Image (cartoon, grey):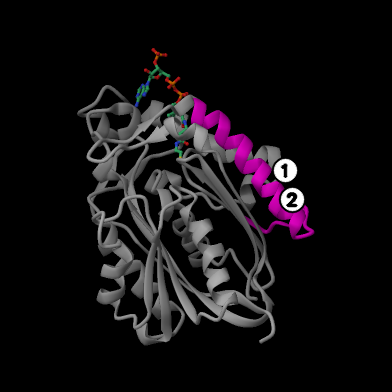
Amino acid sequence: MGVRGITLSGCGISVPDKVVTNDDLSARLDTNDAWITERTGIKERHVGGITSQMAIEAGRSAIADAGLEPADIDIVLLATTTPDAMVPATSATVQAAIGVPGGALDLNAACSGFVYGLVAAAGLVSVGAGRVLLIGSDALSRITDWDDRTMAVLVGDGAGAVVVEPVDGPGSLLSWNFGADGTLRHLLKCDHGGYLFMDGKEVFRKAVRVVVESAERALADAGLAAADVDLLVPHQANLRIIQAACQRLGIPEARTAVVIDRYGNTSSASIPLALGDALAQGRVSAGDHVLLTGFGGGMTWASAVLRWGG
Ligand code: COA
């Protein structure tokens, strides 16, 4: 068997219907639209989602977008931090509901999960798997204390999915970079049955440094420079983190996908939601270099460089 690369052949998203604006939050918490907008860039978020349900909707939509049927998919790979239950894996619920005949597994790398999942999908394809339905889905609203203004203003629910297809030759994934530092696990955590806790200032400081380093390494491994990046798709945690990363990387915000104003931080879903939005707007063409980069609890971080279209 020769080299088997990947290409992304379809994309779909899903968010719950219920929208909570900054003014809605201000009505019940000691906060206001100006503070939230200035510190985070978030204007509204969707809440009340169920991880499996959003994943099923996004997954079906990605399969249809690729012009395929569920029977054409071999594996469901679900990146999530908020599984429906401890056991079984939420991907099993998704696999059965969509009607995918093959395997199913969950992956948790917090907000870096989608990029970890993309590289894992490429690895599965390289050892002979057929198409992988890669989904990032999270319902952070379910592990958030809505009386805690420091977390409530930041989070939202959603899902995004792509179909990862085998192709002959090296394919779209030019390079990738993973990192983790478990000594920082206290910065962002949620114990069983508890609520999300975050040391926001410390996460902010570390996040900018690690995503920039990770993105630079991935670009160097692909033999590319910042000027070659047609679209940066960063994890959507905070607009100021995105802006700081853009500035240090030397990638203008005009070449960056930003949806945090509409969705807040949706963890594993944030990168595919931003990618889906960019695709829907026709911002990605065959041959474009797309840089995905994320960070999250763990801490973990991950970057991947794609040449769109294989
Ligand atoms: N509304 C109004 N005021 C608030 C508030 C809210 N929702 N939350 C905190 N404040 C207050 C604080 O009490 C503090 O008041 P004080 O100055 O009187 O003590 C003030 O606002 C500043 O708080 P601070 O925590 O210093 O703000 P910040 O500029 O660090 O912004 C975050 C807070 C959370 C927005 C920011 O730290 C951040 O985005 N961190 C990274 C988050 C992230 O990326 N998380 C996801 C990782 S995957």
Q: Position of residue 126 (x, y in %)?
A: 60, 76
Along the viewing direction, whichever of 302 and 106 lies nearer the viewer: 106
Residue closest to the far top = 30
Q: Secondary structure at mark 2?
A: helix
Q: Is 84 drawn above or below residue 202 in the view shown?
A: below
Disc ID at residue 271:
none
| Marks 2/1: CA–CA distance | 6 Å
Within the image, what quadrant is residue 265 found in? Answer: top left
Residue located 34% across and 83% down the image = 101
Please tell me which of labels 2 and 1 falls first in the chain: 2
Taking the image as shown, residue 10 lies to the left or right of residue 122, namely: left
Residue type, label 2: Ala
The C terminus - image quarter? bottom right
Evaluate whether residue 168 shows in this view: yes
In the picture shown, does residue 276 fall above or below 182?
A: below
Checking the image for residue 250, the label placed there is 1
Q: Which class describes the residues within 10 Å of circle 1: few (<14), some (14-19), or many (20+)?
A: few
Q: Give percent across and percent down for residue 121.
A: 52, 69
- Which amino acid type is shown beneath numbered disc 1? Gly
Locate residue 193, reporting x and y percent.
22, 40
Task: Tell me the residue at 47%/63% (across/down).
Answer: 276
- Image point (68%, 66%), residue name: 288
Residue behind mark 2: 226
Task: Please give the range of residues in magenta.
Answer: 202-231
Q: Quadrant of ligand 1?
A: top left
